[in-house]
Amino acid sequence: MPGWVLMNRTLKSYSHMSPSPIPGFSANPPTACFCRDIQASLSLFVWSASLGPPSQTCPPAEIAEHTSTSPTHQFGQFTTDPNLMGKTWSSWRKGSVCHRVGINDYCVYMQSSFNKGQGISLVATSSTIDSLSKTRGFVNRLLITLDDSIAPVAPGILQTRPIKDKGLGVVAAGNTIKSNTKVMVDMPALMIDPRAFTDLSQELLSDLVTEAADMLPTASGDAFYDLSGGEGLPRDSQGRALAIIGKNAFRTKIGEQLEFHTVFLNVSRVNHACSPNVAYYFDPITMRKSLYAVQTIYPGEELTIGYVDLTQPSQTRQSSLSYWNFTCSCSRCTQPSRRLRESDDRTAQLLGIRNKLDQYDISLRDGQAMAELLIALYEIEGLEARIHEAYYRAAIEFNGVENRWKATKFARLCLDRGLLLKDETRPFVVQMRSLVEHPEGHWSWGFRLVGEQ
Ligand SMILES: [Zn+2]
């Protein structure tokens, strides 16, 4: 009955509210400003806590995880100016506004040729700019020059369209998009040194971010001001740029030391769902944020990412999402009450199993069955964006009872999905590679059998 499947998928509704007008940034304290990242950090903590036997290092994987406007926006609009194609950028242009706090002098720095004319503006100190300019990607600028073969999105694949009750969203416009397919590549347009949020008053910060947005090339500045968060505030009003940043920024780390709150003009148009069909990965060297389908996406279906930790019960998710001023009405959140209860029960069990497995208690005897149930729970809850976390645990459990083939199978599955979203250096990738190459030499080999005859 393929018709049923298609209908189910096509009719799948992700209708939630888009953020309501924000009266001013003060309505959202700066520290709460980036709660999608706070949630990501929490999840990372959970994984970091999953240490193996003493002295062993086991592995993190974290989650990924925003909103839109302007029906006139076209993906790839920054790639069409032949004068800018392939041009390397000149040095940073410094803005006219600076605010000093102690030894930190925050100013605006901009390069207009970044990403083939999209431009990039930073609110940062000169030492941060120096450090950024010395990172691998900036030293070898070819690494971060988005070449012609990598448009933000293949033409005709996606389009921005009004979504019921959600403002604008991004939908699959052409053919069916298969899982594991890259659907979008984006680069930063505006980056803020996070220290500026604590060092500066809202008024001074607003000064700087407004200049940062205004210094972007015209098309990029227009696209920035079309993002959600500034509804109800005139473009030239103090606070609009800051309000937009508050609703659209992602935390990005570059190298060991540098961290920013970053706005991407295309990615920021993708709405939220609690069973998202897209996951993303930011490469700190190439400065590219890549979005991958993690489920099959049918024509007309909206692309969604998760803004918050999705392995939480519905109430917790809604509470976290209230930061964006909407009540999520995605398909996972709007099930009939008995099914929603069931979904919350499954989510609670998922968390319980994960926590249990992460204790690596050698007296646990059902670890493999628990890990297989964990995979099923991720699947039922539509958490494909993070399913590598469950595969990882299954690989460890089966290796723990010296079942090398099942351990290798789950390690392969973990790498297949995990490497879409994480880089080679992540501990969990290193762990799974090591297990695949030599299961018997991996720390987990037989650890569940210790003490057995
Ligand atoms: Zn939801």
Image (spheres, rainbow, N blue to C red):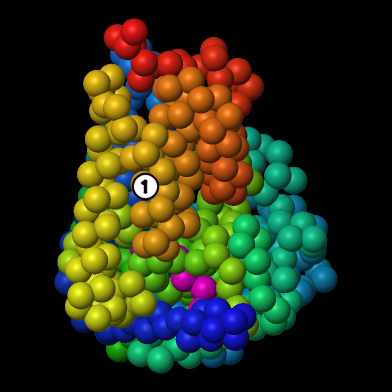
Left or right, 441 with respect to 88, comes to left
Residue at 27%, 65% (x, y): give it. Answer: 343
Residue at image location 61% in from the left, 62% down from the top: 179
**Percent x, y of residue 12:** 45, 81
The answer to whether residue 165 is visible is yes
Look at the picture and state if 348 lies above or below 435: below
Residue holding disc 1 = 373
Viewer-closest of 266 and 79: 266
Q: Is residue 132 visible?
A: no
- Residue 305 part of the magenta-drawn span: yes
Q: In the figure, 134 relative to 183: above or below?
A: above
Dot 1 amino acid type:
Leu
| Residue at (42% x, 22% y) in the render | 400
Question: Magenta residues, as a range?
Answer: 301-307
Secondary structure category for the residue under label 1: helix
Task: Please tell me which residue lies in front, 291 or 202.
Answer: 291
Q: Is residue 131 magenta?
A: no
Q: Residues within 10 Å of mark 1 (few under 14, many from 20)?
A: some
Q: Residue at x 72, y 66 (%)?
A: 151
